[in-house]
Amino acid sequence: MAEAENFFWCTSGCGSGQIHESGHELPIVICLHCSHRSCFRHNVAWHQGLTCDEYDQLLANPDNFRSRLEIDNDEWAASQQAQLNADRAMAQGLLEEERRAAEMRHRREREERERTRKAIELARQIAARRKVEEEMSRITVGRTTKPCPGCGWAIEKNDGCSHMTCVKCKHQFCYECGADHRQILEKDNTVHLETCRFHPSQLEESGAEEMENTYGADADEEREEEEEEEEEHDVFDEYAEFEFWGNYPVEEEIEEEGEQAEDEVEVEDEDENDDDEYDGYLDYSDEEDEFDGYWFGTDEVRRIHESIRSS
């Protein structure tokens, strides 16, 4: 049997041999005794990972030989390295993009915080300046104006008399003490506060006309023309003559019907002797000039004054 063409001794040294009928077509021989694998073609232990042709190339040029498996492994390793490099590059690109995005996001956040800080600081400065301006305005308004007794509107008196008319509610009042102008007209200057310089208790006899000039002008006309003020003051002086205006109307009212003719003759005689004096007063009474201020004097003088004005 050992002399048969396809007989093969096991290369493991177990001393067993066998006939390998497939020959070179299937060169792997598996020992029936020890299961060792051998190459039928090269009579060596089976060259694992190499075909018989590759094993021949290995034998022919062992230094430069590379098997298909090694080539495949190298190609696979190269592809794996390329993939790894690509993944690393992509990862680095993603990391770079993420880094740039994070940096840009942080820069925007810093800029936003800076803008917010500046806006808050500017608002703080504006609020502080506005507070100072409002305080200064409040002080100025409190120093230069007085509230209207009717609506509380701040009113400033630049010049002229103290008879004020509110532009908002049209309430008329004394700028010195706030007394109602209508009540002053209906009554007298006692409506003013006792501390007001226009109250009768505060008026001096020598300065009554000067005080009347300060407050006694009508607010609608405001006495802007100096000539009208002087003319009205003259009319006031003539009306304030108690000796004439206090006696003449009273005598005329107490006349009885039986003595009317005799008294009329006496009056005519007096008129002939004193035409200049009486005509001067009568001229003033016939004029349509009106003094719109407040009356200074006793109630009796005021009643006489009103009786003359209504006649």
Image: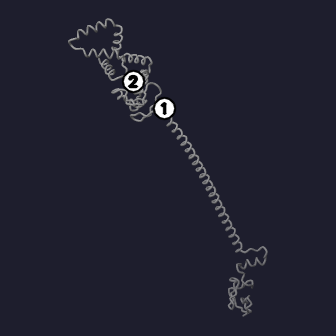
Name the residue tied to disc 2.
218
For the residue pair 138 and 199, the one nearer the viewer reads as: 199
User: In x, y percent, where is residue 271?
Assistant: 31, 8
Instruction: Label 1, secondary structure: give it.
Output: helix
- Give the residue number, with chain letter if any, for mark 1: 144
Classify the position of the N terminus by image quarter: bottom right
Tell me which label, 1 or 2, sits earlier in the chain: 1
Q: Residue 289, relative to residue 58: is it above or below?
A: above
Amino acid type at image mark 1: Thr
- Quick one: label 2, few (<14), some, or many (20+) residues within 10 Å? some
Q: Name the residue located 63 percent from the left edge and 57 percent from the top edge.
A: 99
The residue positioned farthest toward the left in the image shown: 258
The Cα–Cα distance between marks 1 and 2, rounded to whole angstroms, is 22 Å
Q: Is residue 44 left or right of residue 229?
A: right
Asked if 240 appears above or below 82 in the picture, the reply is above
Q: Is residue 128 left or right of residue 238?
A: right
Q: Secondary structure at mark 2?
A: loop
Q: How is the image coloured?
A: one colour
Farthest bottom residue in view: 1
Question: Looking at this view, is 93 or 117 the one in front?
Answer: 117
Q: Which image quarter: residue 44?
A: bottom right
Q: Residues within 10 Å of mark 1 (few under 14, many from 20)?
A: few
The quadrant in which the C terminus is found is top left
